[in-house]
Every structure is written in structure tokens, then in C-alpha cells.
Image: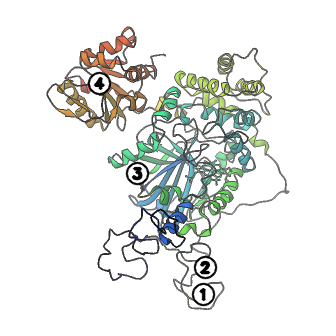
Amino acid sequence: MTESFKYGDGKGHGGELHQKPGSDKEVMTTAQGCPVSDDQNSLKGGKRGPTLMEDHVLREKLFHFDHERIPERVVHARGYGAHGYFETYDPIPELTCADMFQRKGEKTPLFARFSTVAGNKGSPDLARDVRGFAVKFYTQEGNWDLVGNNIPVFFIQDAMKFPDLIHSAKQEPDRGFPQAQTAHDNFWDFISLSPESIHMIMWAMSDRAIPRSLRFMEGFGVHTFKFVNASGEEKFVKFHWKPKQGMQSVVWNEALKINGADPDFHRRDLWDAINAGDYPEWELGVQVFDREFADNFEFDVLDSTKLIPEEQVPVQKIGKMVLDRVVDNFFAETEQVAFCTQNIVPGIDFTEDPLLQGRNFSYLDTQLKRLGGPNFTHIPVNAPKCPMRHFQQDGHMAMHNPKGRANYEPNSWPRGEDNPRACPEHGYKSTEEPVSGSKLRYRSETFADHYSQAIQFYQSQTSVEQQHMQNAFVFELSKVEHKPIRERVVSHLLNVDKQLAKGVAEGLGLPEMPAPAEAAMSPRTDLPVSDALSILKNAPDSFKGRKLGILATDGIEDGILDGVLKALKQEGAMHEVVAPTVNGVTTSGGKHIEGDQVVNGGPSVLYDAVLVLTTEDGAKMLAEIPEAKDFVMDAFAHQKFIGYVDDAKPLFEETNLLKQLDDGFIKLSASGADEFIKTLRQLRYWQRNP
Ligand code: HDE
């Protein structure tokens, strides 16, 4: 069933129903369709009870409520999804026969879900964590699920270690905390004993793990896959999603505060952007390479803790994803969507990456638990949009059993839609791959280098980003109670960068430096810097899709406000007015401006830049409000641009900022709005060191 029926529309089971007088479309019914006369009072014997068992309306209401929850995902429980489409650029038949890449401009519908990994379903959005980046393409030849992350490598090399990794990252089992964070002993104990995690941990401690918006992050398929063309020629491929909005992250102190001010920050941002018509877009890029490259590459392409630098194999853009529709219902779509890495289509194939092979089992298996039966493909968000013909039948909640008499193969009944057969010419074929060898549990020597790409990643960051990483290590390890674990992590960092290890050791107050961790292979320090690995080196030169927080009071100048709002609109940026009351403010010209937030509900961490638009009296009044002071002091500490008018000075004086006005403060005049917005394109004033 790909199209759901609406309750009460009379189309549920067999066409139009005769409508009884009075049973118009507003009348509430039970799930069985019986009109309800009172849904607020249970049926009682006497005015004060007892409540009667006979009350079928009460029993049904409670029964259904009691069963509303399904198990949350064991990882990636907290997520947010949206619908959209993929638009193919130029056809690439020479690379793959995958149907969706064959026709220029063709649009393939899709559903995307972004998530954090460790936190439970109700955890805050801005946890320091990897973000899931899962896309289900409803292609003409079946669903293709590209279930990736916003980081191109992974913590472990073999699926066998996944339950250990996740157990260590989630709440500790005895105490049931901490929630949605890895800053605790178990996680760092596991990491410090698993050197293969060190490359990924550098990414997890970088700003990649605290994105400003789901719209501002990259996505990666992580594993090496295969492309296969119609002649059966195969190439290796790695998938990349590049946000057209550009990349951007928050700073850690900001993340902590956003989680308090708006735990739904990321989902609200995506919802708002799509509803405002500012549809986020990502280009799908592929790194395609052949076996010869794979054989000569410094690392094993089957090892998911390694990436291939874009400078070595360029990313070729083959189309774009546009998210243009929010869900109608969070549970029906975002919660019930079931991504399975095994969902691939002709033209795409797996490699022997041992992580990927394990995932192919795990995702299918987990849906059975989560969604309660094998018929989760009947749920509209999971159902393919192309025809399905098979002999699978029955099971819990079967919505559309195959028609006809034939339900087995071989059979001699007439062929047709109800009696399909496998097709050797056009059906999915796995690529031929010679397989031989002894049965053994083994980690290949080609997977043994754990530090070289961690070094390369660190060296490819700007100094600001390196400092953020150092701070992140200090923060996380300062929450670790057991000192030998802290030391073990530093011993690994010594193999990555001595300065970094020293900074972390100092930040932790380690009495002495441990010896470097033993490495299975000596790390390479000669891998070239890869600029593509840095966020700041690839920052967008635009304020589009970003939000300005305007701290305003009564009596502000119309000219300045109008100029800023006009320039913001031109840039494709948004704003919110933060006012002493949520009713808003009145300008000097008598215009009423609605407030979006009251001062203690709209801290500056919610915005990409701020503007203090006030009068002298207004500024004096703000100077008495602690949250208004936090507003400017946080904006300053988080290296944000601060626009202001001269009259704002009493507030700056009170917060000690008047002495510290730097080039990140921009004084506004009625004609200066365009220049102001141009400056905001830099997103942060990194030169200001807190
Ligand atoms: Fe997952 N992962 N994973 N994972 N993963 C799940 O599937 C698993 C891995 C990723 O929005 C689960 O439906 C194993 C890598 C995303 O619904 C589960 C291994 C990458 C999502 C599972 C990995 C991911 C999941 C939990 C190691 C990036 C959320 C619920 C072998 C390439 C999808 C579910 C959504 C979800 C297993 C490693 C990404 C248990 C066994 C590597 C984005 O099946």
C-alpha cells in the first residue's frame, strides 16, 4: 500500500460509504468507525462511579495509547527527516547502469534522515557526536539506501566490534548516564584500547561533530562501493554529499548553551528552512577509481578507517539532492523509515569491506525488532515507488498480499503480473569476484596503519580548528575519572602530533608525559596536507541561510532596521527580533515590530551574528537584564560579528565590552546595511581570541 487512506473519508475499504445524517466529517469515531458522543468522560455506574468495564470507547483509547511506543533505534535514535528529490546531472552510463543516473535532469524522489548516534530519542541536538546522513532513493529499479555519516571514516574496521563500540559510547550500564555524550570513562577506555579508532576520534573531536545546522554539513558513504556498467565493467566508488549552503559549525561553549536554550535546534532549523522555501541542497559526488589505483594506494580501500584524499582522486559531481517537503507526521515517516544498507540497485555493488558486510545483516535485522514484523516494506515511507512482484506473503500487518493463485516457483500457471519470474538478463547480478582462502578470524596486515591519516587530518586543519580539537580532547578527558585512561589517550596523541599531545596533557594537568603508544606500523608523516578536510578552508562566502538575532527596544530608528532587513532578504538570510517582551517593539516612526523571542528566551547562541538596535534609554534598561548582558557577552566570546548603534554603548559599558571593541564590532548607519551583511559572510571573527 503506497497510498494511505484518510480515516473517515469513506474510501478505506471499498469505495464511498453512505453518510448517516449528522455523521459529517468532523465527527470523531473510534478506530472501528463508531461515532463517539463524549471522549472526555468515561462511562460510570452513578455520577461518581465506578467506571464500567463495558466502556468500549475508554478501553480502546487507553489500549491504543498504551501501545504507542516502538523500540527506539539502538543507535541514531535521535533523528530528523524530510522528503525531496535527486536531480541527475549528465548521464554516466560508462560508470554505472544504475537507472537513476541514466537521464539528464531526471528527478528521483527520496527521503533523508539526519541523526546523532549515541543519544536517546529525546536527547539534545547539539551533542558532540557523529551525524548520520541516510538517504533512501525511490528509484525505478528499487530502493537504494545510501546510509552514511557526516564523517568519511569510522571508528572500527570490523563489524564484530560494533556492539562494543556502541556499548562503550552510550550511557554507562550501572548508572544510566551520561546521556548523549562520549565524555565518560567507558568510551575513552574503549578508544584508548582500540588504536584503529584514532583517525576517527580526531574527526569526532573536530568541529565536524558540532555542526551549526544539518544543512551545513557534508555526508559520506564511508565504505568503498562498486559501480558496474551495462557491459559488466566495474570500478570502485566512494560517495560524497557536498552542501550547497557551505559548511559551518558552532563552538563548543555555544553547543552547550544551545542544548539548554533549544534542544531541538537542528530539527527546528531544518523544519523552518524548508517551510520558508529555503530548500537545502547537496551535490552528490563520486570518487571513482580502478583496481590498479586501489592496489597502489597507501591504504587498503576496504578499510573504513581510511579515506582517499580528494586531491588524489577528485570528487566528480553527478547530481544534486533537494529537500523540499517536511513530513506530514513525524512517527509515520521519520520514526518508521527503515534504512537498510543491503538495499542496492543494479549498477551498484558492495565490496568485501568487513564493516559493510556486517551492516548488511544488522540493518535488516534491527527493523524486525523496531517495526514488529517482516512487512515494514508495506509502510508508505519504506515502500518502493516502482512495481513490486514477488511471492512473499502473510506475516504481521500484511497490507497487500500478492494476488492470484501462484505463490511458489517453479509453477505452470500463466505468467503475468501476478505470476512473475526471475530474469537473468535484467535482474540484479552481483559482480563476479574470485574468492578463495582458509576460513579464519583475522585482521589483514593491510589494515594495520592507524596513525598516518590521523596525522594528515590534523595537519590539514587551520590553527583555529586545531585549537578547537585540543580543547575538545581536554573537555572530554577531564570528564574521565580514571587517570590511566586519560594518559593512554595522550599516549596515542603523541603518535599524531607532539604539540597537540603536550597541549592536552597540560590542559589535563598530567604530572608527566606518558610514553607514546606502541604502533603496529610506524606512522607516515609525509602525507600531503588535504585542504578538503578542513571546514574553515572551505567556508562559504555568504550569509545565505544564516540567521541574525536583533536585540531591539522601543524607539529604534526605522531607517537602520529597514536597511538591514532589506539587505538580509537580498542575501537570502533570516532574522529574529529579540525584545523585552514577546509583543515586540515600536520604532521611532511608530511602526510595530513583532517580537520573535523575549530576551530570556532568545540567547545569542541561537544566531549566527547579532545586532544591538536600541536607544540610549533602551540600552540602559538592557544593561539591567542579566540575559541581555549574556546576549552580547556570549556573542563576543563565541567570536561572532556584533552590529550596533552608538546608543548601545551603555550595554557595552556594563558588560566591559566597550574597552574591547574590535573589528568584529560593526557600527551601523542608515546606509551601512549592505556593508554589514557583506562582513557577516565571514561568519565569525576568528581573530578575536577569547
Ligand atoms: Fe549504522 N546502524 N551500523 N552505521 N547507521 C543503524 O539501523 C550498524 C555504521 C548509520 O536514520 C541501525 O535502522 C553496524 C557506519 C546511520 O534510520 C543498526 C555497524 C555508518 C543510521 C546499525 C554500523 C552508519 C544507522 C540502528 C558496523 C556510516 C541511522 C537502527 C558494522 C557509513 C539510519 C537502524 C536512520 C543505524 C548498525 C556502522 C550509519 C543497528 C552493525 C560505518 C546513518 O542496524
Q: Residues within 10 Å of mark 1 (few under 14, many from 20)?
A: some
Residue that appears at 68% across and 44% down: 166
Disc nearer the start of the sequence (2/4): 2
Provide residue 232's location: percent of width, then percent of height.
60, 64
Q: Earlier in the sequence, mark 4 or mark 1?
A: 1
The disc label shown at residue 406, or none: 1
- Residue type at mark 2? Phe
Q: Are marks 2 and 1 in contact (CB under 8 Å)?
A: yes
Q: CA distance from mark 3 to mark 1?
A: 41 Å
- The residue type indicated by label 1 comes to Ala
Find numbered disc 4 in the image and state the secondary structure of the residue it sits on.
helix
Residue 612's place in the image compared with 33, above or below, is above
Amino acid residing under circle 3: Val
Q: Quadrant of residue 153?
A: top right
Marking on residue 322: 3
Q: For mark 2, does the 10 Å Cα neighbourhood hold few (<14), some (14 to 19), or many (20 or more) residues?
A: some
Q: Is residue 526 visible?
A: no
Q: Earlier in the sequence, mark 2 or mark 1?
A: 2
